[in-house]
């Protein structure tokens, strides 16, 4: 792995100038490295971050891929993108979000291909440095911090041996439960809104978690506080809490107890275990807290990338096509560009290609905004021909896509902009599967062309970790009680046992997990029946898993 030469760097700097003129915004400093296929095999398990801490699972992945490469030499990214289109790597490059931004390029790329890839990379950097879901990473040199974390873990491994890997493995088993949105809300809170810790505790924790008031009562309290503020101005908070204490005498004591703990707001599972585990508080085990913190911070760094996959890749594909088609360096390479661009941005009949879907959706948004079709007047039109011919020529399309890039994640992107006109224009559909009894094969068919069904299919495939909350009122006698707020998707049963063993070790005592599971066995689908059946609506029951002394038991509640 080495830096690109000066000739290629000049090409990159020229692409930066054209990209900025087109409306992209990003920092001046970037680093570009040339990598071989062997380098890619070693970097891919670490998400292309060379300084990420060492972990035995990554070594296993490297050995597996090296064995495959020796038997069947290939471009490893081409295999990845064909088999798993949801992964965030382009066949010829990848970029990581750090300061300065770092990107990697295959060592056999010609200059014209590098021009296309540079535009793709610059759009990624623009997205990283402007999208609000990445705000906690904007000023951070993650590669430098990862190197420091790597050295810390290496030092601990030299002292503690394999126990370091056990702690990493147990921590990574629950690192998808980090409080990404709670941390983001603190960063995005307007500076002019200054609330005391008591006010935050009352509305965020006391009413919602401790008293568990209804939504109606909660909104009444919000209105009461706003009315008090209008009447009493500077002394409004004191007046408000004088009434609160009369209604809830226990409030002051609970607030003082929480204040001594230091941390405001609701902790995620990793943070709660790190700060409250009796096992980790022991002098001989305190080194484990630093490992948990490294795993948690690393997970928080990657959370926005998992939540903006379609948006991010669509944005980069939208711009590399837009800018490269206007670049004179495409001349003579039109066929090569068309082939590679189709490889990256082709719409599959079954499944999702985030590059293709996001790129076309951005183009759709720009066209709709240019024609004024996001106005109330357009929404009132019912005639199909009038809707098709509607064009106010507002010229606001580019401003609209830039705002979408700044404020949206995948859920909002799909939920707001995948409409019937977009589905019809690109001939999209929801595919069904059924068994052909005569040929003994599964066959696919067009199940629905409705935008609502297609949108729901996309939303169901987005990254959405389970919402598991620590029930502090039930966590007693050294037993950690976890409550899974069921959102329609049950936990994966085969992972429950190993995950709870890890939590039990880190907590140092029994762990209970309350969750929901479907009643009865999974129904067998009959020959010729649609799969899955649209009429199937399984019922669920609450169950309680208990992990004690590495033995798992289950009880129906």
Image (cartoon, rainbow, N blue to C red):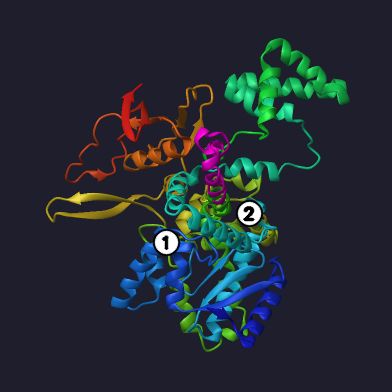
The one nearer the camera, 407 or 430, is 407
Residue 104, magenta (yes or no):
no
**Which residue is tagged 2?**
134
Q: Residue at x 42, y 64 (%)?
A: 347
Q: Is residue 248 visible?
A: yes
Checking the image for residue 147, the label placed there is: none
Q: Secondary structure at mark 1?
A: helix
Vertical order, 115 against 498 (above or below):
below
Q: Residue at x 57, y 41 (%)?
A: 179
Q: Residues within 10 Å of mark 2 (few under 14, many from 20)?
A: many
Q: Secondary structure at mark 2?
A: helix
Vertical order, 300 against 252 (above or below):
below
Q: Could you say where residue 266 lies in the image, as x and y percent from the top left?
A: 60, 33
Tell me the quarter of the picture where residue 23 sits.
bottom right
Asked if residue 315 lies left or right of residue 86, the reply is right
Q: Residue at x 42, y 53 (%)?
A: 162
Q: Main secondary structure of the magenta part?
A: helix
The one nearer the camera, 77 or 482, is 482
Q: Residues within 10 Å of mark 1 (few under 14, many from 20)?
A: some
Q: Residue at x 63, y 54 (%)?
A: 134
Q: Could you say where residue 94 lies in the image, as x and y percent from the top left?
A: 52, 69
Report the Cα–Cα distance between label 1 and label 2: 26 Å
Asked if residue 10 lies left or right of residue 176, the reply is right
Q: Is residue 131 visible?
A: no
The one nearer the camera, 231 or 133, is 133
The one nearer the camera, 425 or 344, is 344
In the rendered image, the residue lying farthest to the left is 438
In this view, the mark in front (1 or 2): 1
Checking the image for residue 58, the label placed there is: 1
Magenta span: 272-294
The number of numbered discs placed on residues in the rendered structure image is 2
């Amino acid at each position: 792995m080495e830096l690109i030469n000066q000739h290629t760097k000049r090409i990159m700097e020229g692409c930066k100038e054209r990209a900025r003129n087109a409306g992209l915004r990003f920092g001046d400093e970037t680093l570009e490295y040339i990598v071989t296929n062997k380098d890619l095999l070693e970097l891919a398990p670490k998400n292309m971050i060379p300084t990420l801490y060492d972990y035995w699972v990554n070594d296993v992945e490297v050995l597996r891929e090296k064995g495959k490469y020796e038997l069947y030499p290939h471009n490893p990214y081409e295999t990845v993108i064909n088999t798993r289109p949801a992964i965030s790597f382009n066949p010829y490059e990848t970029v990581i979000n750090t300061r300065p931004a770092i990107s990697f390029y295959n060592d056999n790329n010609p200059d014209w291909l590098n021009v296309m890839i540079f535009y793709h990379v610059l759009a990624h950097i623009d997205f990283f440095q402007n999208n609000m879901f990445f705000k906690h990473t904007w000023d951070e040199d993650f590669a430098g911090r990862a190197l420091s974390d790597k050295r810390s873990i290496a030092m601990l491994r030299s002292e503690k041996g394999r126990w370091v890997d056990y702690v990493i493995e147990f921590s990574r088993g629950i690192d998808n439960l980090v409080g990404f949105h709670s941390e983001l809300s603190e960063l995005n809170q307007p500076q002019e809104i200054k609330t005391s810790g008591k006010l935050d505790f009352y509305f965020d924790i006391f009413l919602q978690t401790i008293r568990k008031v209804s939504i109606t009562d909660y909104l009444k309290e919000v209105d009461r506080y706003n009315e008090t503020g209008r009447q009493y101005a500077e002394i409004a908070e004191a007046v408000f809490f004088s009434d609160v204490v009369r209604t809830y005498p226990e409030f002051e004591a609970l607030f003082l107890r929480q204040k001594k703990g230091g941390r405001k707001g609701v902790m995620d599972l990793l943070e709660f275990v790190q700060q409250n585990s009796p096992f980790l508080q022991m002098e001989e085990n305190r080194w484990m807290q630093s490992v948990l913190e490294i795993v948690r911070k690393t997970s928080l760094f990657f959370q926005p990338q998992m939540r903006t996959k379609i948006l991010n890749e669509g944005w980069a594909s939208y711009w590399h096509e837009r800018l490269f088609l206007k670049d004179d360096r495409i001349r003579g390479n039109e066929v090569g560009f068309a082939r590679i661009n189709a490889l990256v941005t082709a719409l599959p009949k079954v499944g999702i290609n985030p590059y293709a879907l996001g790129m076309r959706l951005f183009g759709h948004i720009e066209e709709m905004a240019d024609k004024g079709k996001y106005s109330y007047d357009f929404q009132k039109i019912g005639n199909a021909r009038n809707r098709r011919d509607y064009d106010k020529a507002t010229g606001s399309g580019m401003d609209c896509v830039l705002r979408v890039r700044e404020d949206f994640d995948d859920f909002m992107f799909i939920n707001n902009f995948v409409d019937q006109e977009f589905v019809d224009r690109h001939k999209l559909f929801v595919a069904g599967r059924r068994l052909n009894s005569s040929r003994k094969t599964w066959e696919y068919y067009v199940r629905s062309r409705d935008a609502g069904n297609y949108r729901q299919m996309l939303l169901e495939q987005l990254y959405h970790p389970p919402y598991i909350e620590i029930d502090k009122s039930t966590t007693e006698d050294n037993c950690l009680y976890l409550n899974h707020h069921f959102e329609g998707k049950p936990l994966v049963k085969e992972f429950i046992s190993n995950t709870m063993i890890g939590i039990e070790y880190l907590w140092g005592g029994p762990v209970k997990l309350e969750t929901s599971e479907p009643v009865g066995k999974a129904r067998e689908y009959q020959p010729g029946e649609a799969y899955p059946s649209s009429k199937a609506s399984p019922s669920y029951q609450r169950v309680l898993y208990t992990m004690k002394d590495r033995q798992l038991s289950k009880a129906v509640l």
